[in-house]
Image: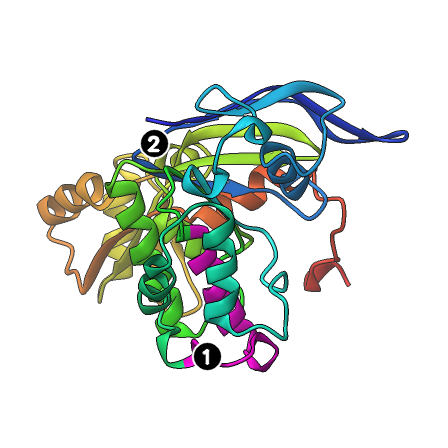
């Protein structure tokens, strides 16, 4: 079992501190989402983990060892940081064969990962003819080439079509199910919510959260109940007797904040309130993320109501 361990990691560029005493651990067997606003330090952290940059202080290790000390690193760690990294004049297959040869990986793996990522029909086309989504798949194929224990992907859904997005979800779940360590950086909150078991959230280089995804949402966004009824007066009266307030929404439905359907349903049933709909609306990852990071976004546009 190989974990990613970041301890007191700090990186300074002149007077600017991009990563600030960061400590967290990414464990095998689950998908960890790596979130944060632009400028939060995610890309810098990934570069430090992969030995592409040197920390000012602190450590980043994989299975207890720095990346630069790993023998045949592609057999231990697979990473996608830049989908444009492949040489445009090579074919997709030749790009993977070169990587395989330099890391003592069997050549057959090139064809296997091309098939797995859906690129087999384009294997002998030059990379410069690939679309962004195809380059993204090639980068993922390269990350999987050595059947690594650790997989780090930066924005893997970027440029993928809907089929590709569904495919990447399934791939991440499979890798975690095989007890691999999976760390995925993304700005797509709804997409991250669909695959991430755990979250590490950064803001201005500092750790803001390190927690299971559902806990992250539930501690920041309380659920509410959506109700449809033909007798609003009876609804409001029944809820008021139990200390709840119903608020009418623009579409004619009513909502009760900080409650669940299992709590509200029996009260309305006992009062004989006619119901057309009774649904618990849970908070979303996007809501929880924006609530947490509002003060840590380095670049933030005004919201429409503020303009």
On screen, residue 207 versus residue 280, left or right, reads: right
Residue 253 in view in this figure:
no
Q: Which residues are magenta?
A: 122-143
Quarter occupied by residue 206: top right
Residue assigned mark 1: 124
Q: Nearer the viewer, residue 103 or 122?
A: 103
Q: Is residue 161 magenta?
A: no
Q: Earlier in the sequence, mark 1 or mark 2?
A: 2
Crowding at dot 2, Cα within 10 Å, few <14 / some 14-19 / many 20+, comes out as: many
Residue assigned mark 2: 28
Q: Quadrant of the N terminus?
A: top left
On screen, residue 237 versus residue 304, left or right, reads: left
Image point (51%, 54%), residue name: 99
* Residue 69 higher or lower than 187, as above or below: above
Residue 294 in view in this figure:
yes
Image point (46%, 79%), residue name: 124
Q: Position of residue 285 (x, y in %)?
A: 45, 47
C-alpha gap between disc 1 and disc 2: 35 Å
Q: Is residue 141 magenta?
A: yes
* Residue 250 higher or lower than 281, as above or below: below
């Amino acid at each position: 079992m190989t974990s990613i361990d970041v301890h007191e990691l700090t990186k300074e560029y002149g007077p600017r501190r991009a990563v600030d005493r960061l400590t967290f651990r990414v464990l095998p067997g689950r998908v960890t989402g790596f979130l944060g606003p632009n400028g939060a330090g995610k890309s810098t952290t990934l570069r430090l983990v992969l030995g592409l940059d040197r920390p000012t202080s602190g450590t980043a290790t994989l299975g207890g060892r720095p990346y630069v000390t790993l023998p045949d690193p592609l057999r231990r760690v697979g990473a996608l940081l830049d989908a444009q990294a492949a040489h445009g004049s090579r074919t997709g297959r030749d790009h993977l064969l070169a990587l395989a040869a330099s890391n003592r990986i069997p050549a057959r793996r090139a064809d296997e990962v091309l098939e797995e990522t859906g690129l087999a029909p384009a294997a002998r086309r030059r990379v410069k003819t690939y679309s962004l989504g195809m380059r993204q798949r090639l980068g993922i194929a390269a990350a999987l080439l050595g059947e690594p224990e650790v997989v780090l992907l930066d924005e893997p859904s970027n440029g993928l079509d809907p089929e590709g997005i569904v495919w990447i979800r399934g791939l991440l779940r499979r890798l975690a199910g095989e007890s691999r360590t999976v760390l995925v950086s993304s700005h797509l909150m709804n997409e991250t919510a669909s695959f991430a078991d755990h979250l590490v959230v950064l803001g201005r280089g500092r750790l803001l959260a390190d927690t299971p995804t559902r806990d992250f949402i539930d501690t920041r966004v309380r659920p509410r109940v959506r109700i449809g009824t033909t007798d609003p007066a009876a609804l409001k009266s029944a809820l008021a007797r139990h200390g709840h307030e119903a608020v009418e929404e623009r579409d004619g439905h009513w909502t009760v904040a900080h409650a669940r359907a299992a709590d509200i349903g029996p009260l309305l049933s006992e009062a004989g309130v006619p119901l057309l709909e009774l649904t618990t609306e849970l908070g979303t990852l996007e809501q929880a993320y924006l609530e947490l990071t509002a003060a840590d976004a380095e670049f933030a546009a005004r919201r429409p109501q503020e303009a």
